[in-house]
Amino acid sequence: MTAKELLLAIHALRLFDKVPQMDDAAFSAYHGKLDTFIERFPTLEGQMKTSFRDKDYAGFASRLGLIRDMLAEIYAEDLAKECAKLISDTQEARHEKLEAYMTYFLTAVSMLSIDIQMALSKTDAKEQGPPPAPPREIPDDGHQKIILAVDDVSLFLNTLKTVLQNSPYKFIGVSSGSDALRFIDKKTPDLFILDIEMPYMNGYELAKRIRALGHTAPIIFLTANAAREYVIKAIQAGGVDFIVKPINNEQIMGKIEKYLN
């Protein structure tokens, strides 16, 4: 697929009546705006959280305004409207309510940034990971599909377990890379969900070990960071997608269904 086609598939970008009309020069300019958004958002996010923590609502709203303008420039119109509402709410909403809304909004914007980066990386050979390991033979015997999740924080494993308890999938949660490697020595998961920031063996290292052992099932990374270097390292380690923390049921199930159905 072309970069245009991959970007058109991102629902948060309202591009269906815009990108098809762009010539090469216009699309190159749009690509530049996407790059600006990807690069600037993590810094603005951090500054915004600092302003909020310090109850500097003027600074908080100022950073939000910059994010809103970038979202509008890349045609993320619904998120730009959400951002404008959040700016308006800073004048009257309680701190606790504002924090909940901010967390929801930033999660959505982080996911958009990652989706854009994943789409663009597929058309950029420089950001591709190493060739996949030879596939292991997995019999198509109608077995219950296994999801292996690895996170050193039990809260996230418990959340995933709760979300998946009524699903048709078998959920296995372990708290370290070594536990994960012991499990896959005996079983073959159909999907991996790996936290990035873990002690002893981080998610990137674990993903590389999984691929080296011949497992080719999709790897989804758990992250709270949309910075470009995180995404590139994940792709190079064999990752295909992300779930952004704090996680929610809709996001989890959407990602899982995308790769298991």
Image: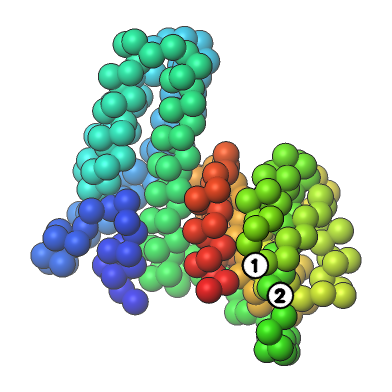
Label 1 vs 2, first from the N-terminus: 2
Q: What colour-coding does the image apply?
A: rainbow
Q: Give the camera-side residue of 127 and 12.
A: 12
| Horizontal relation, residue 170 to residue 127: left or right | right
Mark 1 burial class by Cα count in 10 Å: few <14, some 14-19, many 20+: few
Residue 61 shows up from this direction: yes
Residue 176 place in picture, x, y as percent:
82, 52
Distance from Cα at disc 1 to Cα at disc 2: 7 Å
Q: Residue at x 27, y 46 (%)?
A: 76
Residue 214 place in picture, x, y as percent:
73, 80
Q: Give the camera-side residue of 214 and 220.
A: 220
To which residue does mark 2 refer? 144
Residue 118 place in picture, x, y as percent:
45, 61
| Horizontal relation, residue 230 to residue 180: left or right | left
Q: Is residue 114 above or below residue 224?
A: below
Q: How many marks?
A: 2
* Disc on res. 168: 1
Q: Residue at x 49, y 58 (%)?
A: 254
Q: Amino acid at mark 1?
A: Pro
| Element type at mark 2 | loop
Residue 230 shows up from this direction: no
| Element type at mark 1 | loop
Residue 146 place in picture, x, y as percent:
72, 69
Mark 2 burial class by Cα count in 10 Å: few <14, some 14-19, many 20+: few
Q: Quadrant of the N terminus?
A: bottom left
